[in-house]
Image (cartoon, rainbow, N blue to C red):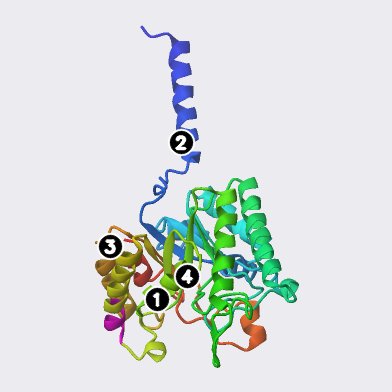
Amino acid sequence: MKHPLLITLILVALCACKEHKSDVDPYIPAPVGSYAKGADCSWLTEQEQDNVLFYNAEGKATECMRLMRDSGMNSVRLRVFVNHSTGWCNAPDVLVKAKRAADLKLRVMIDFHYSDYFADPSKQNTPQAWKNCTVDQLCDSVAQHTTSVLQQLKQIGVTPEWVQVGNETRNGMLWPLGQLWTSQGDTPNGWTNYARMTAVGYDAVKSVFPNAQVIVHIDNAYENNNWFYRKLKQNGGKFDIIGLSHYPMMRAWSGKDWPEMNKLAEQNIKLLHGEFNCPIMLCEIGTLAANVSSATQVMTDIRKRLDSLDYFAGIFYWEPQVFNNWKPAEYKKDGWAAYNMGAFTSKGTMNDALITLWK
């Protein structure tokens, strides 16, 4: 006969184990260096302040990062402004989102804009606090800002797998000193200054996180971009990964239909790897939310084209969680229309295009 006390202890232990297991997140993170299935969701905390809610397929309100993670996302990209007037995407806000992502066992990409506002090919505005700096002083500011943000991440236990030094820097960054050309032609010392700024950012990243992969990111994956990275290297620039943006449904930008843009992106990614022998990543992709069927075809096609390339490192949807004409504060102030390439339905659930991207 079994001892009654022993039976009781076994039952208590089994109950305790059951309770303990229920508290453990069963999610297994994707290994470092594996294919990134990601999203840039930098507006998320501002949306939450505006009481935007997100729902799973059963209609249950769910935290957005967890919702996307449980549907296949394994990585999060977060932009960093130097001193945005609203405070969103400045370092304190980024730390909140990065910590949440890390707690969910998601991999993290940090995207330094080196500006107080969005940096892209049409604007790379020097932060107000750095306005009167010389090139030497700008390089010091890049190093200090990069190091400071990354050290703060380290202090809260977040280790980014990737770090972008600049965002869509086809025409350099930190204008005018880091600008590559104007309508009058090439900027004197533009490539030298830009490459130096990039190298300083690269070194700052490695000083805090030696294993982080540093990305130099430009737009238009459908264009041949070898010339850009060639000139960057010739002038002393450094990178571990080439990052590109790709918005294949924006015919107004390119004059091309999405099948051609996807085909060209595949060709140009192969050309880039052939010359530079490094991983290539789509750091941004977006499709028109109004046409979910076509958007799903776009995502199916681009994944089919790129997944067979062992050097293709991953793909990040840009701000999929925007829906129902939500606008960030800066869009309202500037009179801009709402972002129209989100990938959630009007009910706050993910649409098929986004789910297809992460399959």
Query: CB of mark 1 within 8 Å of CB of mark 3?
Result: no
Q: How far apart are the alpha carbons under marks 1 and 3?
A: 25 Å
Position of residue 346 measured from the top left corner of the image (x, y, whole percent): 46, 76
Q: Which residue is mark 1?
A: 227
In front: label 1 or label 2:
1
- Secondary structure of the residue carrying numbered label 3: loop
Q: Which residue is mark 4?
A: 232
Query: CB of mark 4 within 8 Å of CB of mark 2?
Result: no
Position of residue 71 measured from the top left corner of the image (x, y, whole percent): 39, 59
Residue visible at 39% across and 47% down? 31
Highlighted magenta segment, given as a residue range:
257-262
In depth, the one of 108 and 178 nearer the eye is 178
Q: Residue 127 appears in which quarter of the rendering? A: bottom right
The overriding secondary structure of the stretch rendered in magenta is helix
In front: label 3 or label 4:
4
Residue 144 is a magenta residue: no
Query: CB of mark 4 within 8 Å of CB of mark 1?
Result: no
Identify the amino acid type marked 3. Answer: Asp
Identify the amino acid type marked 4. Answer: Leu
Picture disc at residue 307: 3
In front: label 2 or label 3:
3
- Secondary structure of the residue carrying numbered label 4: helix
Q: How far apart are the alpha carbons under marks 4 and 1?
A: 9 Å
Q: Residues within 10 Å of mark 2 (few under 14, many from 20)?
A: few
